Image (cartoon, rainbow, N blue to C red):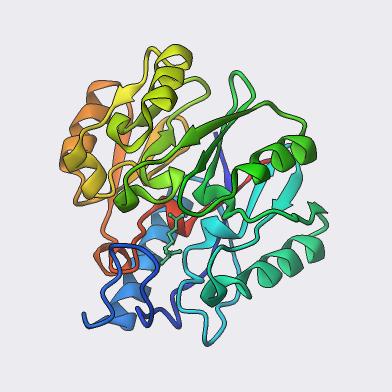
Amino acid sequence: MSRTYLLCPPSHFDVSYAINPWMDTSAPVDTALALRQWRDLCEALTAHGHTVHTLDAEPGLPDMVYAANGAFMVDGTVYGARFRYPQRQPEAASHEKWFRAAGWRFVAPTETNEGEGDFAYVPGPGLILAGYGYRTDPRAHAEAGEALGRPVISLKLVDDRFYHLDTALAVLDDHTITYLPQAFSASSRKMLRQLFPGAVVADEADGLAFGLNLVSDGVNVFLNAEARGMAAKLSARGFTVVPVDLSELKKGGGSVKCCISELRF
Ligand code: ARG
């Protein structure tokens, strides 16, 4: 099925501050390479029949390429983001402006939340999965449920290398998810086991290769090229893996999913 995505080019990408354990401000960043890799990601999406919209990158906002964090949208309603760290806070206004100009119903948040970084939607049961522990305030989970009219399952993240839900869990099709159990608290693991007995269970190597930070259209899975173990698991389950090399963007602590905000009508 054809999907619609919003991405933002890494025109001003850099690692000039560190707000997650992946970011090393002393490591050199190749912005031109990041842009080439990002363009290849866009081409992979459009080559599979998906629509890509782009948000203009702004100078001084080096993390803006991680467009997933700017909003969370279900059933045509957008629940806006409110970033945890001051360095990223101005990004929210750019997303809001884009969604309002495009005519979407926009609900402004009062609670801290980082959009699709910590919110995922499972279309089959119509469930919102929501992470907390590092970025999104659990109070935003209730606010999102109220804004979007879908039940929300709160999941606690416990490993700071997997600081956003989308680094530890991904939705593969209407009913199937994949997740890294040890990134969640024991109770959250129990909930995930109960709700998704057929999940693709990832291991730490998959997580560290950003193998959970994927985007799936239900058939094709756009996956960080480095995540070969995850690629094998997904192929074994009948998914077609589309590897994308985003090595440069990993320096900011993100990969495929972080770069993509999904517009759900
Ligand atoms: N440097 C960014 C941050 O720490 C990376 C965000 C990654 N995005 C994501 N959806 N996980 O905020």
**Residue depicted at 37% across the width and 46% down the height:** 167
Which image quadrant shows ligand 1? bottom left
Quadrant of residue 237 within the rendered picture: top left
Q: Please, is residue 129 above or below residue 208 in the view?
A: above
Q: Nearer the viewer, residue 140 or 217?
A: 140
Q: Please, is residue 62 above or below residue 237 in the view?
A: below
**Residue depicted at 58% across the width and 20% down the height:** 124
How many marks do you count on the picture? 0
Q: Please, is residue 223 above or below residue 200 in the view?
A: below
Q: Residue 58's spot in the image, x, y percent?
A: 57, 82
**Residue depicted at 36% across the width and 59% down the height:** 254
Q: Residue 262's spot in the image, x, y percent?
A: 58, 48
Quadrant where the C terminus lies? top right
Q: Nearer the viewer, residue 212 or 21?
A: 21
Quadrant of residue 206 within the rendered picture: top left
Q: Is residue 29 left or right of residue 97?
A: left
Q: Residue 72's spot in the image, x, y percent?
A: 64, 48
Quadrant where the N terminus lies? top right
Q: Nearer the viewer, residue 218 or 86?
A: 86
Q: Is residue 256 left or right of residue 128?
A: left
Whether residue 265 can be seen here: no
Whether residue 162 can be seen here: yes
Q: Residue 168's spot in the image, x, y percent?
A: 36, 40
Q: Is residue 103 left or right of residue 24?
A: right
**Residue depicted at 28% across the width and 49% down the height:** 210
Q: Is residue 112 left or right of residue 215?
A: right
**The furthest residue to the bottom:** 59
Q: Please, is residue 220 above or below residue 250 in the view?
A: above
